[in-house]
Amino acid sequence: MIQRIQTVYLILTFIITGVLLFFIPLWTLNNGKPFYFMQDQFYTVLLGLSTVLTVFSIISYKKRQNQFVMGRLNIILNLILLGLFVYRSLNLSGETVAVSEKGIGMFLPIVAIVLLVLANKAIKKDEDLVKSVDRLR
């Protein structure tokens, strides 16, 4: 399980969606306080679902097709999250004296999407390898 490259990509995705966003704020509000994803229930549910999909994908390493489908669903979920983060950051007012700052945490779903794409590519490669060996029998 760990020796496969897609598991490494999925573990990195888990670290980004499940651990790193607790420590990196999405943006800073006008009053100077950092905004974490836990302060909005909708973001918490979506990131929790993304993390659960990643864990299930890691656990189901014997079922490559299910792993591939869960990876695609996770990519779509992270795209939705990214869209919501960008929409929310564009609606932040920055014209007051205390200008709001956009944080790097807002773009962590992009890194997760890239890692999920790489994992799906490796899963597809494994599946093609297994199919080619079955053809030779």
Image: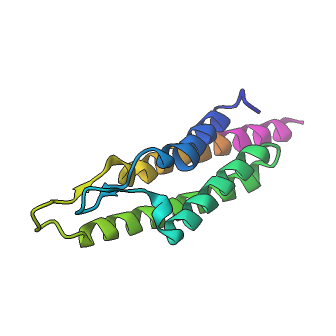
Residue 136: where, in percent of width, then height? 84, 35
Residue 134: where, in percent of width, then height? 85, 40
Q: Is residue 22 left or right of residue 100?
A: right
Along the line of sight, the residue nearer the viewer: 54 or 115: 54
Within the image, what quadrant is residue 66 found in?
Answer: bottom right
Along the line of sight, the residue nearer the viewer: 125 or 134: 125
Which residue corresponds to the image point at 33% horizontal and 69% vertical from the top-left? 88
Residue 63 drawn in magenta: no
Magenta: predominant secondary structure element? helix
Q: Is residue 6 above or below residue 120?
A: above
Task: Give the residue at the far top of this rendering.
Answer: 3
Task: Give the residue at the far right of this rendering.
Answer: 137
Residue 126 drawn in magenta: yes
Residue 103: where, in percent of width, then height? 31, 51
Which residue corresponds to the image point at 54% horizontal and 58% vertical from the top-left? 75
Q: What are the residue bounds of the magenta stretch?
A: 125-137
Along the line of sight, the residue nearer the viewer: 15 or 30: 30
Report the quarter where the C terminus lies: top right
Q: Is residue 85 above or below residue 58?
A: below
Which residue corresponds to the image point at 62% horizontal and 42% vertical from the top-left? 10
Q: Is residue 132 above or below residue 38?
A: above
Which residue corresponds to the image point at 52% horizontal and 71% vertical from the top-left? 42
